[in-house]
Amino acid sequence: MNKEAIKYHIRGLLEAVGEDPDREGLVETPERVADMLEEIFAGIALTNHDIAVMFGKTFTAEESDCSEAVVMKDITVFSWCEHHLALMYDMTVNVAYVPHGRVLGLSKIARICDMAARRLQLQERLGRDIAEIIGEAAGTPDVGVRITGSHSCMTARGIRNPSARTETLTLTGSFRTDKSLRTLLD
């Protein structure tokens, strides 16, 4: 990430909207924004494979442990809409997968969701990315991801509908055909 370029362009943006980037409250804003963007877009430089390797700590599961799905609900993330650079917020992710001999460490599921969200995104792609990463990290083709969230491109601009929520559902493997597995994501 080129923080010097970000600072230069943020200063220009402040000028373009009619602000004085040299006034007291804005003098350090370009540096603060560059630091913030480095943090919130940490996932841009990573492929899904990189994230799967980074958070792919698994444990051997007994065959009896692999007959039921692992489910984690209400993982909180935020991201940025690539169309408007608008915040996608108040997002919750529900993830379920059927182990195939290995189970992920529970914190890794939440970390995968968080890192995948740290990119310019579409909510639909975020669900697919999470499913792909969980599938690779856990070694399973059977993954379901439900994401519900608010998008400031809908709530704060354009239609300005603050109660609008978007829900997406990504299903792979047995989650596509087994309705009982899909209900775990509700």
Image (spheres, helix red, strand yellow):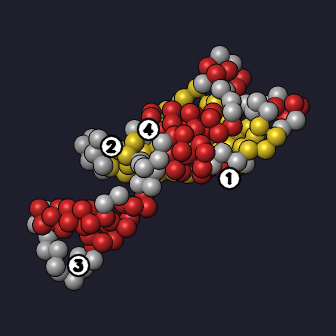
Q: Nearer the viewer, residue 160 or 171?
A: 171
Regarding mark 4 in the picture, which secondary structure is present there?
Answer: helix
Residue type indicated by callout 1: Ser
Image mark for residue 149: none
Image mark for residue 27: 3
- Residue 184 at least partly seen: no
Question: First in sequence: mark 2 or mark 4?
Answer: 2
Query: Residue at 23% of width from left, 78% of height from top?
Result: 27
Tell whether 74 sits left or right of 43. Answer: right
Which residue is disc 4 drawn over? 123
Query: Callout 4: few (<14), some (14-19), or many (20+) C-alpha neighbours within 10 Å?
Result: many
Q: Nearer the viewer, residue 118 or 168?
A: 118
- Give the CA separation, mark 2 to mark 4: 10 Å
Residue type indicated by callout 2: Glu
Residue 104 in the image: x percent, y percent? 72, 43
Which residue is disc 2 drawn over? 82
Question: First in sequence: mark 1 or mark 4?
Answer: 1
Residue type indicated by callout 3: Val
